[in-house]
Each structure stands twice: as structure tokens, then as C-alpha cells.
Image: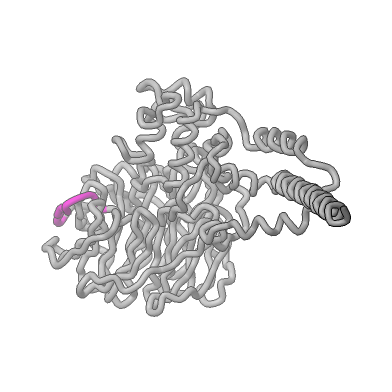
């Protein structure tokens, strides 16, 4: 009897302990679930966008895509004067199409001109300057078209998400300890070092995309030292090519599209701005990084700039199709050359500082008097965008290269062509060493080295088309930027890669 009672009491006690354990377990489980919901609701907008992008449950909004069009396309495709009557400034205008018909087919990016042309899947490739849009921006356009041409904005989307999340917040749940635990689920790729987000940067993509390098829009090599300048969004990075070390960082008020060292290597120029809004040129002292001057007030970005040998004149040009010459000391506008009919892509003063060469997207080369921008000569022959200049030491000959795959040498005494030769594919970048050897960056993803007469000397392959190149000050090496954003150092004697310039990761890189 006593033994049976003891057994029943033991079983009853174990049953009670089991019930209490289950209650505690369920209570802890509900608290944990509540913490996850609260942590999810407490995310800042940027985190929500990133998380939803990874999950793939958000759509690309119109303001995200509009930012791409504003930066890359508005100079030609906005308002009543839009080229081809294609206005990209509103969804309604895009749906209306242009003079050649529909520009977009909702849900079908591979059949939409506003995607296939900037993606270089069909011709004519856009933008006409030749460089393909960064992959991240192409992915935004692709997703936006696939999603049905949404007219929503990020602000509206965030507001809806915030309201929805607020309903899910349980009251009086412990959150602080568990929200930090979520950080341990991040992958290394999600914790890349980031710079402060720029006001005009592209909003986060609404679907997962692989981090991409942006195309390098300019390069500059000091003529007297081992310094190389590389643009990085709204900054200019100055490296020493001998050890690939970062020496200087200059901040610029916009995106950088042109770089140039002064002939004595003391000053570095950067031209650029904000697409469809403003353009300017800034000059810094190279050693200290101190800003010396800012000139220009363009209606669009500056695509080309140069400084005269004496440092007194600054020339600039871009989509406005006007070459403007400024005094670097007073900032005064000294002259304008208005005879170009297309975007100005290249500018270079002669070695004696008396003449200024300018080349445009149509293929026209104008030579002007440096101090006044008055016309001196018109050099016609190229049938595509001008990609490079080189003045002879005596300033009486000018070598030009273009996307028409030709190199031409001009006699400035009578404005006639002395000679010409062709490359295997469009020449996207060009430089020439003191001995006269030419370095050609080709669209066929090759570097071609030739003699002054075009005789082939050597060539080597790249991973992608060469968008920019410059020779080092001693002519022994070439710095090449390709279309995917890689910046590499090659030894000219054998074409071997010696190293790579590593640009810091940013939100758009």
C-alpha cells in the first residue's frame, strides 16, 4: 500500500514537472518569435531594402530607374528637344516611345530598346560615348521592365512597409539582445567596407545582384613622376604605380569623367558633375591635395578638360558642344568655340600653348587659338567618336584616333592629313610615348603597340574591351582600365600584368 502510494506520487510529480517544462519552453519560444518580429520591424529603411532585395520580394521603383536615366541619358533624351523624340524623364513619355516607335515593351526587357541598346546587345549602342552602363544600373532597368514599368517611388514603398511592420510589433518584448544576434547571419560579402552614401547615388536594387565594378571613365598619368590618377565616383584616387600604393584622395562635387595632370605635374584637373544638371572643373595641388580653383558652370557634365603648359588656361567641354577657355587665376571666361555639332570628348593644348585641339562624338576635330578659342583649322576625316590626341613636340603635327578604328596624322601648317592607318577594331583609348610608339586600346579587348607608321610591334589580350589607357612617365608600363572596371598595370616589353589598382568598395561599385 505504501509502495503503491509512493509510486503514484512520483508519477504525479514527474507529470507536473513535465507540464511546467513545456510551459516554460512555449513561453521562451513565443518570446524568441516576438523578438524576431520586433527586430524585423525595427530595421532602418536601408536595411529593409537590402533584406528584401536579397529575398527578391520587392520591385524596382521608378525613382531608382529615373536616377539612372538622369545620370546617363537626360543630356540627349529629355524634354521637347529630346533626340529621336524619345523622352526618358517620365514613365508616360517612355511608354509613348520616340520617332522610330516603341522604346519599351512591358515585361519584356530583351525586346525593349531602352534596355538592349545600353546593354550593348543591339546597335546603335548607347550611350554614344562607347562605354556600357555599369551592370548594376542595367539590372535595375531590366528588373523595372520585367516588373511592368512601376510608377511607384521608394518613399511610397517604404511607407507601406513601415505601416505593415508596425501591425506586427508585439508589446513589451525584450529586443536588444536578440537584434544583435541577427548580425551573425551576415555573409562576408554583405559586410564589405562602405563609404558614406552619396545624395545622388542610385537607390539599392530591388533584387539580388552580384557586386559589380563601375566602368572607369578616365585615367591620367603624371608626365614627371610615377603618379596615376583614377576616378572613383565622386572622388579622385592618386596612386604610385611603382608599388600600387594609394597616395592621395580628392573629393569632387559630382561624378568624374575627365582627368589631366599639368605638364609640370604640380596640378591635377578633374572634370565632371551631375548628369543633366551641372558641370565644372576642379584643380588641386598634387602634393598636398589642396584645392586651387574651380571653373565652369555647365548645364551638363564636363567630359573633357586640359590645362595649358603655363598653367594659366583651362579648357573644358562636354554635351553642351561648346569649348570654353577660362583663366585659372581669375576664373574669367576668355573664349568659346561653338562650331562643334556633337558632344566634345577630347581636349588637348599644344606643347607651345598656342593651339587647342578638340574632338567630338561625330568625329570632327577642331583646332583653335588657345587664348581666345577662335577657329584655326578644321580636320575632317574620322567617322566616329574621337578617342585620343597627341601633339608633336614642335606643335606642328597632331595625331588623332577614333572609334572608326583609324589613326590619322595631320599637318597643322596647311590642315591636311599626312598619313593614316587602321587598327583591327574601334580604338577606344590612345597614348604615344616620346619615341613615337603608339599604344592603342581596342574594343576587341586587346592592346596594340605600333610604330608611328602603324607597323605592328606587339599586342596582348585583355579580359574586356579597353576603355582607358595611359603610359607611365618613363614609357615602360601602361595602365589600362577595361569595361568591367578593372585597372591593371602592364609591362610594355612583354605585355605581362604586373599588378592591379584596387579601388575601395562603394555602394555603386
| Closest to the observer, 273 or 120 | 120
Residue 263 locus on image (x, y percent) = 40, 71
Residue 35 visible in the current orientation: no
The answer to which of 206 and 328 lies nearer the viewer is 206
How many labels, in total?
0
State whether residue 57 is above or below residue 204.
above
Of all residues, the one furthest to the left in this rendering is: 455
Q: Residue at x 40, y 31 (%)?
A: 109
Residue 423 among those drawn in magenta: yes
In the displayed structure, would residue 435 be above or below residue 355?
below
> Viewed as shown, does residue 406 lie left or right of 104?
left
User: What segment carries the magenta color?
Assistant: 418-427
Is any part of residue 95 visible from this angle?
A: yes
Q: Residue at x 29, y 58 (%)?
A: 463
Percent x, y of residue 177: 76, 59
Residue furthest to the front: 1
Q: Nearer the viewer, residue 35 or 115?
A: 35
Amino acid at each position: 500500500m505504501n509502495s503503491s502510494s509512493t509510486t503514484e506520487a512520483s508519477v504525479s510529480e514527474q507529470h507536473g514537472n513535465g507540464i511546467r517544462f513545456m510551459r516554460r519552453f512555449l513561453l521562451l519560444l513565443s518570446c524568441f518569435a516576438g523578438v524576431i518580429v520586433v527586430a524585423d520591424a525595427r530595421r532602418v529603411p536601408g536595411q529593409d531594402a537590402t533584406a528584401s532585395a536579397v529575398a527578391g520580394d520587392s520591385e524596382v521603383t521608378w525613382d531608382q530607374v529615373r536616377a539612372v536615366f538622369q545620370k546617363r541619358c537626360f543630356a540627349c533624351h529629355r524634354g521637347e528637344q529630346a533626340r529621336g523624340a524619345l523622352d526618358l524623364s517620365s514613365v508616360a513619355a517612355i511608354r509613348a516611345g520616340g520617332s522610330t516607335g516603341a522604346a519599351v515593351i512591358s515585361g519584356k526587357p530583351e525586346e525593349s530598346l531602352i534596355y538592349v541598346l545600353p546593354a550593348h546587345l543591339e546597335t546603335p549602342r548607347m550611350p554614344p560615348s562607347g562605354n556600357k552602363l555599369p551592370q548594376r544600373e542595367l539590372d535595375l532597368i531590366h528588373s523595372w521592365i520585367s516588373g511592368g514599368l512601376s510608377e511607384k517611388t521608394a518613399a511610397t514603398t517604404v511607407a507601406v512597409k513601415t505601416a505593415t511592420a508596425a501591425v506586427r510589433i508585439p508589446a513589451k518584448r525584450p529586443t536588444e539582445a536578440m537584434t544583435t544576434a541577427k548580425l551573425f547571419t551576415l555573409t562576408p560579402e554583405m559586410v564589405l567596407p562602405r563609404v558614406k552614401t552619396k545624395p545622388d547615388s542610385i537607390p539599392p536594387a530591388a533584387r539580388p545582384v552580384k557586386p559589380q565594378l563601375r566602368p572607369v571613365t578616365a585615367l591620367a598619368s603624371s608626365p614627371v613622376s610615377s603618379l596615376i590618377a583614377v576616378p572613383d565616383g565622386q572622388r579622385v584616387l592618386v596612386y604610385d604605380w611603382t608599388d600600387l600604393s594609394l597616395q592621395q584622395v580628392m573629393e569632387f562635387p559630382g561624378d568624374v569623367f575627365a582627368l589631366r595632370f599639368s605638364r609640370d605635374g604640380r596640378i591635377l584637373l578633374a572634370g565632371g558633375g551631375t548628369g543633366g544638371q551641372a558641370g565644372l572643373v576642379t584643380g588641386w595641388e598634387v602634393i598636398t591635395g589642396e584645392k586651387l580653383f574651380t571653373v565652369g558652370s555647365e548645364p551638363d557634365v564636363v567630359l573633357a578638360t586640359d590645362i595649358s603648359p603655363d598653367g594659366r588656361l583651362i579648357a573644358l567641354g562636354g554635351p553642351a558642344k561648346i569649348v570654353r577657355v577660362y583663366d585659372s587665376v581669375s576664373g574669367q571666361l576668355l573664349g568659346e568655340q561653338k562650331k562643334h555639332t556633337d558632344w566634345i570628348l577630347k581636349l588637348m593644348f599644344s606643347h607651345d600653348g598656342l593651339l587647342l585641339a578638340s574632338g567630338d562624338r561625330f568625329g570632327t576635330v577642331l583646332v583653335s587659338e588657345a587664348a581666345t578659342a577662335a577657329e584655326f583649322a578644321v580636320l575632317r576625316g574620322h567617322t566616329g567618336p574621337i578617342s585620343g590626341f597627341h601633339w608633336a613636340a614642335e606643335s606642328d603635327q597632331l595625331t588623332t584616333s577614333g572609334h572608326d578604328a583609324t589613326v590619322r596624322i595631320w599637318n597643322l601648317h596647311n590642315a591636311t592629313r599626312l598619313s593614316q592607318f587602321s587598327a583591327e577594331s574601334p580604338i577606344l583609348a590612345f597614348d604615344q610615348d616620346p619615341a613615337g610608339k603608339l599604344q592603342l586600346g581596342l574594343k576587341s579587348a586587346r592592346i596594340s603597340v605600333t610604330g608611328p607608321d602603324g607597323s605592328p610591334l606587339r599586342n596582348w589580350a585583355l579580359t574586356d574591351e579597353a576603355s582607358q589607357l595611359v603610359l607611365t612617365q618613363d614609357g615602360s608600363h601602361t595602365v589600362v582600365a577595361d569595361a568591367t572596371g578593372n585597372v591593371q598595370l602592364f609591362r610594355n616589353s612583354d605585355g605581362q600584368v604586373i599588378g592591379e589598382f584596387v579601388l575601395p568598395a562603394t555602394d555603386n561599385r
